[in-house]
Image (tube, rainbow, N blue to C red):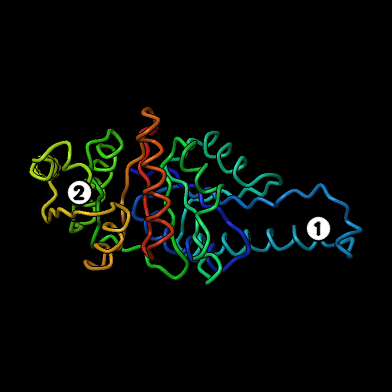
Amino acid sequence: MITKMLVSIDSSAASLHALEEVSALARSEQSQLVLLSVVPSYDGDLRLMGKKDVLVELKDSYIKALVNAENVAKAYNLNRKSVLQEGDPFSQILNLAENENVDLIVVDKKSSTFMDLVPVSAIDTKMISQSSADILVIPEDAPLNLDRILLAYDASEGAKVALKRSIDLSVTYGSELTIVTAFEVPLEGFNYEHNIWDKSYGDAMKLLDEAKKIAEEHGVRHIKTIKRHGKPSREICELARTIKAGLIILGFNHKNVIKKYLTENVMEQVIRNNSNPVWIAKSGR
């Protein structure tokens, strides 16, 4: 299913952790790893930095990180390719992913008190939006566990792609698949349509039945369906903690501008506010 993965490497512990977590999956899938370390470019005045060789030290840290990543991949006996580049990390990751025709881009999510107070970086958001490959975000210290997969499902085309990814992984690894549909009915909606709750509830039931039937037809043996009322991102995160999910899978919508905006907002909130790996399924594959 995943013939080639690109893993973004830097000198942080979070980056090395993400590689270690995905290496077991790469070995199982017999995937080739493309290890990419991007040295950020600097166009300012080096005199202001007080140390002329600071860029050399910076580059050395990325080289060392790439060597450490090589050793991890070697320990898993993985087919691997290492690439060191300079420039804008976002552009370099996307360009290499396209040139190498990768199926999955793996990035880390660093955890700190400060990072928890700010939104997901613009680079991560742009990468998710513009990449044709799937994106896997692995938080620092979080295990990638495929025993329990949580799929967020709605009526979008992106959700159908996410369902397919969930089915592939669940069938291959015998995962317990939980499919959730979270719907939000604003109070003012009742002023315009008195049966809006019944309609929303019925639509959610229909969606879940549809997804469960497809999953069963493709051989998924352990399936649960859950309806949640409330803000989708909050409900997804709370449910992930409740069922102790090892992976959350979300779909991405390219075409409809409004749906695309809503999807990006939900994804950003889920990635920011939960401690589970998040897989963004893209229709570009």
Judge depth for marks 1 and 2 and give the one in front.
Answer: 2
Taking the image as shown, residue 55 lies to the left or right of residue 178, namely right
Q: Position of residue 148 (x, y in %)?
A: 23, 61
Mark 1 or mark 2, earlier in chain: 1
Taking the image as shown, residue 53 lies to the left or right of residue 245, namely right
Q: Position of residue 134 (x, y in %)?
A: 41, 43
Q: Which quarter of the rendered picture does the C terminus lie within?
A: top left
Look at label 1 and name its amino acid.
Answer: Leu
Judge the density around disc 1: few (<14), some (14-19), many (≥20) Cα neighbours within 10 Å: some
Numbered disc 1: secondary structure? helix
Residue position for label 2: 181
User: Label for residue 4?
Assistant: none
Instruction: Identify the residue at horizontal 36%, vertical 39% (top origin).
Output: 252
Using the image as rendered, state which of residue 220 and residue 246 is in the foreground.
246
Q: Position of residue 269 (x, y in %)?
A: 40, 54
- Quarter occupied by residue 48: bottom right
Distance from the alpha carbon under mark 1 to that under mark 2 = 49 Å
Taking the image as shown, residue 271 lies to the left or right of residue 6, namely left
Judge the density around disc 2: few (<14), some (14-19), many (≥20) Cα neighbours within 10 Å: many
Judge whether 55 appears above or below 160 on screen.
below
Q: How many numbered discs?
A: 2
Q: Can you name the residue that lies furthest to the front here?
A: 191
Judge whether 84 appears above or below 143 on screen.
above
Residue position for label 1: 55
Q: Position of residue 50 (x, y in %)?
A: 89, 65
Look at label 2 and name its amino acid.
Answer: Thr
Instruction: Identify the residue at horizontal 74%, vertical 57% (top origin).
Output: 59
